[in-house]
Amino acid sequence: MRSITLFLVLFLSACAVKMNNGPLYSSYYRYEQSVSVDNIHKLQFDFFSSNLIKNLNINEPEITEQLLFKKYMFKQKSHFEKINEKVGCLSINGFDNENMPISFNIKYIAENEHWLIEEIGVLFVNSIADFTDSAKCPSEYQN
Amino acid sequence: MSMTRAEVKITVAKLIEASYSKDKGLTTKIMAEKGSFKLTVDQSGTATLSGNAGVLTFSGTPTLEKIGIKVKRISISFENKGEMNIGYSATVNLAVISLTVNGDFDLEELITSCSGLLCSAARALKGRNRAYEAELESIMGR
Protein backbone atom coordinates (compact mmCIF):
# COMPACT_ATOMS: atom_id res chain seq x y z
CA MET A 1 0.00 0.00 0.00
CA ARG A 2 2.82 2.34 0.99
CA SER A 3 4.68 1.73 -2.28
CA ILE A 4 1.48 2.41 -4.26
CA THR A 5 1.01 5.68 -2.36
CA LEU A 6 4.63 6.62 -2.97
CA PHE A 7 4.25 5.77 -6.66
CA LEU A 8 1.09 7.92 -6.93
CA VAL A 9 2.75 10.86 -5.16
CA LEU A 10 5.78 10.71 -7.45
CA PHE A 11 3.60 10.28 -10.56
CA LEU A 12 1.37 13.24 -9.67
CA SER A 13 4.39 15.43 -8.80
CA ALA A 14 5.94 14.64 -12.17
CA CYS A 15 2.65 15.53 -13.89
CA ALA A 16 2.45 18.77 -11.91
CA VAL A 17 5.97 19.73 -12.99
CA LYS A 18 5.12 19.04 -16.62
CA MET A 19 1.81 20.92 -16.38
CA ASN A 20 3.54 23.94 -14.81
CA ASN A 21 5.78 24.31 -17.85
CA GLY A 22 4.71 27.25 -19.95
CA PRO A 23 4.45 27.26 -23.73
CA LEU A 24 7.99 28.60 -24.24
CA TYR A 25 9.64 25.91 -22.15
CA SER A 26 7.46 23.28 -23.81
CA SER A 27 8.72 24.49 -27.18
CA TYR A 28 12.32 24.45 -25.94
CA TYR A 29 11.85 20.97 -24.52
CA ARG A 30 10.64 19.70 -27.92
CA TYR A 31 13.70 21.32 -29.58
CA GLU A 32 16.03 19.83 -27.01
CA GLN A 33 14.58 16.34 -27.39
CA SER A 34 14.19 16.36 -31.19
CA VAL A 35 17.12 18.00 -32.92
CA SER A 36 20.46 16.47 -33.77
CA VAL A 37 23.15 17.09 -36.35
CA ASP A 38 21.35 14.57 -38.60
CA ASN A 39 17.95 16.27 -38.71
CA ILE A 40 18.58 19.97 -38.02
CA HIS A 41 18.31 20.81 -41.74
CA LYS A 42 14.85 19.25 -41.87
CA LEU A 43 13.59 20.57 -38.52
CA GLN A 44 15.04 24.10 -38.54
CA PHE A 45 11.69 25.65 -39.58
CA ASP A 46 9.91 23.91 -36.70
CA PHE A 47 12.02 25.62 -34.04
CA PHE A 48 13.62 28.80 -35.43
CA SER A 49 11.91 31.92 -36.73
CA SER A 50 12.17 32.81 -40.42
CA ASN A 51 13.95 36.03 -39.41
CA LEU A 52 16.70 34.08 -37.65
CA ILE A 53 17.35 31.47 -40.32
CA LYS A 54 16.97 33.58 -43.45
CA ASN A 55 20.38 34.33 -44.99
CA LEU A 56 21.98 31.49 -43.02
CA ASN A 57 23.97 28.89 -44.89
CA ILE A 58 22.89 25.85 -42.91
CA ASN A 59 25.42 23.73 -44.79
CA GLU A 60 28.24 25.47 -42.95
CA PRO A 61 29.32 23.37 -39.96
CA GLU A 62 29.67 26.43 -37.73
CA ILE A 63 26.03 27.37 -38.39
CA THR A 64 24.83 23.84 -37.59
CA GLU A 65 26.87 23.96 -34.37
CA GLN A 66 25.21 27.18 -33.28
CA LEU A 67 21.70 25.91 -34.09
CA LEU A 68 22.51 23.01 -31.75
CA PHE A 69 23.30 25.49 -28.94
CA LYS A 70 21.48 23.17 -26.49
CA LYS A 71 24.80 21.27 -26.25
CA TYR A 72 26.26 24.05 -24.13
CA MET A 73 24.02 22.93 -21.25
CA PHE A 74 24.47 19.45 -19.86
CA LYS A 75 22.05 19.68 -16.94
CA GLN A 76 19.15 22.06 -16.23
CA LYS A 77 18.35 23.54 -12.84
CA SER A 78 15.47 26.01 -13.29
CA HIS A 79 13.60 27.98 -15.92
CA PHE A 80 11.41 31.08 -16.12
CA GLU A 81 9.38 32.61 -18.91
CA LYS A 82 7.44 35.74 -19.71
CA ILE A 83 5.12 36.47 -22.63
CA ASN A 84 3.76 39.72 -23.96
CA GLU A 85 1.31 38.99 -26.77
CA LYS A 86 3.41 37.57 -29.63
CA VAL A 87 6.84 37.94 -28.03
CA GLY A 88 8.24 36.01 -25.11
CA CYS A 89 11.50 35.26 -23.33
CA LEU A 90 12.67 32.06 -21.69
CA SER A 91 15.57 31.84 -19.23
CA ILE A 92 17.06 28.46 -18.38
CA ASN A 93 19.70 28.01 -15.66
CA GLY A 94 21.91 24.96 -15.68
CA PHE A 95 25.41 23.52 -15.83
CA ASP A 96 27.80 22.65 -18.62
CA ASN A 97 29.70 19.39 -18.92
CA GLU A 98 32.42 20.78 -16.60
CA ASN A 99 29.73 21.54 -14.02
CA MET A 100 30.20 25.29 -14.52
CA PRO A 101 27.01 27.36 -14.29
CA ILE A 102 25.54 28.53 -17.58
CA SER A 103 22.25 30.13 -18.67
CA PHE A 104 20.27 30.46 -21.85
CA ASN A 105 18.16 33.55 -22.43
CA ILE A 106 16.02 32.99 -25.50
CA LYS A 107 13.61 35.32 -27.25
CA TYR A 108 10.62 33.65 -28.90
CA ILE A 109 8.09 35.00 -31.35
CA ALA A 110 4.71 33.59 -32.24
CA GLU A 111 4.76 32.63 -35.91
CA ASN A 112 2.07 30.50 -37.58
CA GLU A 113 0.68 29.57 -34.17
CA HIS A 114 4.04 28.22 -32.98
CA TRP A 115 6.57 29.72 -30.61
CA LEU A 116 9.81 29.96 -32.58
CA ILE A 117 13.29 30.99 -31.48
CA GLU A 118 14.20 34.48 -32.69
CA GLU A 119 17.29 35.26 -30.61
CA ILE A 120 19.67 33.16 -28.51
CA GLY A 121 21.90 34.36 -25.70
CA VAL A 122 24.33 32.02 -23.97
CA LEU A 123 25.50 33.48 -20.67
CA PHE A 124 28.58 32.01 -19.03
CA VAL A 125 27.59 32.60 -15.42
CA ASN A 126 30.33 32.89 -12.81
CA SER A 127 28.51 31.38 -9.86
CA ILE A 128 25.16 29.89 -8.91
CA ALA A 129 24.43 33.07 -6.95
CA ASP A 130 24.32 34.91 -10.29
CA PHE A 131 21.52 32.71 -11.72
CA THR A 132 18.48 34.75 -12.63
CA ASP A 133 15.27 34.12 -10.72
CA SER A 134 13.03 35.57 -13.43
CA ALA A 135 12.83 35.49 -17.22
CA LYS A 136 15.29 37.73 -19.03
CA CYS A 137 15.48 38.55 -22.72
CA PRO A 138 18.94 38.47 -24.39
CA SER A 139 18.93 42.25 -24.88
CA GLU A 140 18.50 42.85 -21.13
CA TYR A 141 22.08 41.93 -20.24
CA GLN A 142 24.10 41.96 -23.44
CA ASN A 143 26.58 44.73 -24.15
CA MET B 1 30.79 23.52 -29.65
CA SER B 2 31.11 26.94 -31.25
CA MET B 3 33.10 29.04 -28.85
CA THR B 4 33.89 28.16 -25.26
CA ARG B 5 33.88 30.29 -22.12
CA ALA B 6 37.69 30.27 -22.12
CA GLU B 7 37.88 31.31 -25.79
CA VAL B 8 35.70 34.35 -25.16
CA LYS B 9 37.91 35.43 -22.23
CA ILE B 10 41.09 34.86 -24.21
CA THR B 11 39.63 36.94 -27.05
CA VAL B 12 39.12 39.86 -24.65
CA ALA B 13 42.77 39.61 -23.57
CA LYS B 14 44.02 39.40 -27.16
CA LEU B 15 42.03 42.46 -28.20
CA ILE B 16 43.52 44.46 -25.33
CA GLU B 17 46.96 43.30 -26.41
CA ALA B 18 46.24 44.33 -30.01
CA SER B 19 45.25 47.77 -28.75
CA TYR B 20 48.42 47.92 -26.67
CA SER B 21 50.54 47.00 -29.70
CA LYS B 22 48.97 49.81 -31.71
CA ASP B 23 49.49 52.51 -29.07
CA LYS B 24 50.88 51.58 -25.66
CA GLY B 25 50.51 55.04 -24.18
CA LEU B 26 46.91 55.72 -25.16
CA THR B 27 45.73 52.19 -24.33
CA THR B 28 47.21 52.44 -20.86
CA LYS B 29 45.81 55.95 -20.38
CA ILE B 30 42.28 54.84 -21.32
CA MET B 31 42.38 51.69 -19.22
CA ALA B 32 44.18 53.06 -16.18
CA GLU B 33 41.71 55.86 -15.54
CA LYS B 34 39.15 55.00 -12.90
CA GLY B 35 35.68 54.52 -14.38
CA SER B 36 34.15 52.95 -17.48
CA PHE B 37 35.49 52.38 -20.94
CA LYS B 38 34.46 50.25 -23.90
CA LEU B 39 35.97 48.13 -26.66
CA THR B 40 33.99 47.20 -29.76
CA VAL B 41 34.85 45.30 -32.93
CA ASP B 42 32.59 45.48 -35.98
CA GLN B 43 32.09 42.94 -38.74
CA SER B 44 34.89 44.41 -40.83
CA GLY B 45 37.35 43.92 -37.99
CA THR B 46 37.64 47.59 -37.03
CA ALA B 47 38.20 47.80 -33.29
CA THR B 48 37.67 50.88 -31.13
CA LEU B 49 38.80 51.38 -27.54
CA SER B 50 37.08 54.42 -26.04
CA GLY B 51 37.03 56.05 -22.63
CA ASN B 52 37.30 59.42 -20.92
CA ALA B 53 41.00 59.63 -21.76
CA GLY B 54 40.50 59.21 -25.49
CA VAL B 55 39.66 56.96 -28.43
CA LEU B 56 41.94 54.49 -30.22
CA THR B 57 41.12 52.60 -33.41
CA PHE B 58 43.05 49.49 -34.38
CA SER B 59 42.63 46.27 -36.32
CA GLY B 60 40.82 43.42 -34.58
CA THR B 61 41.14 41.24 -37.71
CA PRO B 62 44.12 39.12 -36.58
CA THR B 63 42.24 38.29 -33.36
CA LEU B 64 39.02 37.47 -35.23
CA GLU B 65 40.93 35.26 -37.66
CA LYS B 66 42.33 33.23 -34.79
CA ILE B 67 38.81 32.60 -33.46
CA GLY B 68 38.08 30.80 -36.70
CA ILE B 69 34.32 31.48 -36.61
CA LYS B 70 32.50 34.33 -38.36
CA VAL B 71 31.91 37.09 -35.82
CA LYS B 72 29.28 39.79 -36.40
CA ARG B 73 30.32 41.99 -33.51
CA ILE B 74 32.20 42.07 -30.21
CA SER B 75 31.27 44.49 -27.47
CA ILE B 76 33.10 44.71 -24.16
CA SER B 77 32.24 47.04 -21.27
CA PHE B 78 34.98 47.60 -18.72
CA GLU B 79 34.99 49.14 -15.28
CA ASN B 80 38.27 50.20 -13.69
CA LYS B 81 37.53 49.73 -9.99
CA GLY B 82 40.88 51.12 -8.87
CA GLU B 83 44.29 49.61 -8.02
CA MET B 84 44.61 47.98 -11.44
CA ASN B 85 41.49 45.82 -10.89
CA ILE B 86 39.28 45.85 -13.96
CA GLY B 87 35.87 44.22 -14.31
CA TYR B 88 34.49 43.42 -17.74
CA SER B 89 31.41 42.10 -19.49
CA ALA B 90 31.98 40.84 -23.03
CA THR B 91 29.43 39.84 -25.67
CA VAL B 92 30.43 38.09 -28.89
CA ASN B 93 27.71 38.07 -31.54
CA LEU B 94 28.05 35.12 -33.92
CA ALA B 95 25.74 34.41 -36.87
CA VAL B 96 23.11 32.61 -34.77
CA ILE B 97 23.97 32.92 -31.08
CA SER B 98 25.49 35.50 -28.75
CA LEU B 99 27.89 34.58 -25.99
CA THR B 100 28.37 36.72 -22.88
CA VAL B 101 30.95 36.35 -20.16
CA ASN B 102 31.87 38.52 -17.16
CA GLY B 103 35.15 38.59 -15.29
CA ASP B 104 37.88 40.57 -13.54
CA PHE B 105 41.57 40.92 -14.22
CA ASP B 106 44.63 42.76 -13.01
CA LEU B 107 45.73 45.24 -15.69
CA GLU B 108 49.41 45.13 -14.75
CA GLU B 109 49.43 41.35 -14.84
CA LEU B 110 47.87 41.32 -18.32
CA ILE B 111 50.27 43.89 -19.72
CA THR B 112 53.36 42.19 -18.34
CA SER B 113 52.27 38.67 -19.28
CA CYS B 114 54.54 36.97 -21.71
CA SER B 115 56.60 40.00 -22.62
CA GLY B 116 59.78 38.18 -23.54
CA LEU B 117 61.15 37.34 -27.01
CA LEU B 118 59.69 33.83 -27.02
CA CYS B 119 56.20 35.09 -26.34
CA SER B 120 56.50 37.84 -28.93
CA ALA B 121 57.15 35.04 -31.39
CA ALA B 122 54.18 33.11 -30.04
CA ARG B 123 51.94 36.13 -30.55
CA ALA B 124 53.23 36.57 -34.09
CA LEU B 125 52.30 33.02 -35.06
CA LYS B 126 49.27 32.76 -37.29
CA GLY B 127 48.05 29.75 -35.41
CA ARG B 128 47.25 29.37 -31.75
CA ASN B 129 49.73 28.79 -28.96
CA ARG B 130 48.24 26.68 -26.17
CA ALA B 131 50.64 27.65 -23.38
CA TYR B 132 50.21 31.34 -24.13
CA GLU B 133 46.40 31.00 -24.22
CA ALA B 134 46.44 29.09 -20.94
CA GLU B 135 48.32 31.98 -19.34
CA LEU B 136 45.81 34.51 -20.71
CA GLU B 137 42.90 32.41 -19.51
CA SER B 138 44.22 32.33 -15.95
CA ILE B 139 44.76 36.11 -15.93
CA MET B 140 41.23 36.84 -17.25
CA GLY B 141 39.61 35.11 -14.27
CA ARG B 142 37.54 31.97 -13.84
Image (cartoon, coloured by chain):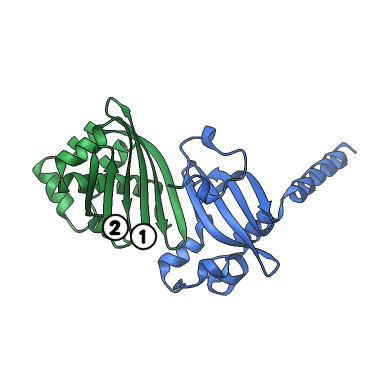
Chain colours: A blue, B green
What residue does disc 2 label? B64
The front one of A81 and B121 is A81
Q: Quadrant of the rendered structure where residue B27 is?
A: top left
Question: Which residue occupies 9% across, 44% down?
Answer: B117
Q: Amino acid at mark 2?
A: Leu
The quarter holding residue B98 reads bottom left
Residue in view at x 50 percent, y 57 percent? A69
- Residue identifier under label 1: B71
Badge number at residue B120: none
**How far apart are the alpha carbons under marks 2 and 1?**
7 Å
Disc 1 chain ID: B
Would residue A68 appear left or right of A5 to someone viewing this image?
left
- Image quadrant where residue A44 sits: bottom right
Q: Earlier in the sequence, mark 2 or mark 1?
A: 2
The one of A101 and B30 positioned closer to us in this rendering: B30
Q: Is residue B134 visible?
A: no
Q: Position of residue B136 (x, y in %)?
A: 27, 41
Helix, strand or loop under label 1:
strand
Three-letter amino acid code of the residue under disc 1: Val
Q: Which residue is nearer to you in this view: A122 or B1?
A: A122
User: How far from the left and from the top, in percent, is residue A118?
Assistant: 56, 61
Quadrant holding the C terminus of chain B:
top left
| Residue farthest to the left, as pictured | B117
Which residue lies most toward the top here? Answer: B83
Residue B121 horizontal/vertical position (percent) = 12, 50
Tell whether A63 sits left or right of A94.
Answer: left
